[in-house]
Image (cartoon, grey):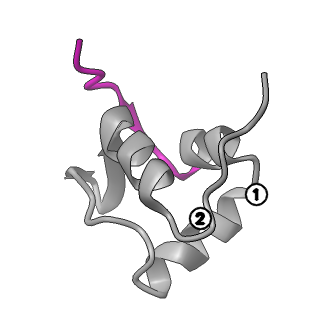
Amino acid sequence: MTDRRLWSYKEIAAHIRVQPDTVRSYRKHGLLPRPDHVEAGKPYWYADTIRTWVANRPGNRPRGG
């Protein structure tokens, strides 16, 4: 099943347990994938896009639980 919900900086930050400004910094430095959608100048990513990015990030370790 595909998760096509659109996530903003806030949802991405909650998913990876950082502050939204950290996610903005990741994008500024080219560390985030390109947005899947832009509305009113604000970028959004599909939840699956972010989950794939998280799984493939350097230094990613499986979390217990």
Q: Which residues are magenta?
A: 1-9
Which residue is depicted at the point 54% across and 71% down?
58
Question: Residue 26 location, x and y as percent?
Answer: 54, 75
User: Which image quarter holds the N terminus?
Assistant: top left
Check the image and name the residue furthest to the bottom: 29
Residue 44 is labelled as: none
Would residue 62 be found to the left or right of residue 4 on screen?
Answer: right
Question: Residue 34 location, x and y as percent?
Answer: 26, 66
The residue that label 1 is drawn on is: 19
Q: Identify residue type, mark 2.
A: Val
As displayed, is residue 29 above or below residue 9? below
Question: Residue 60 location, x and y as percent?
Answer: 61, 58
Would residue 14 be found to the left or right of residue 12 on screen?
Answer: right
Question: Residue 27 location, x and y as percent?
Answer: 46, 74
Which residue is depicted at the point 47% across and 45% down?
8
Q: Residues within 10 Å of mark 1 (few under 14, many from 20)?
A: some
As displayed, is residue 38 above or below residue 2? below
The residue that label 2 is drawn on is: 23
Mark 2 touches mark 1? (CB < 8 Å): yes
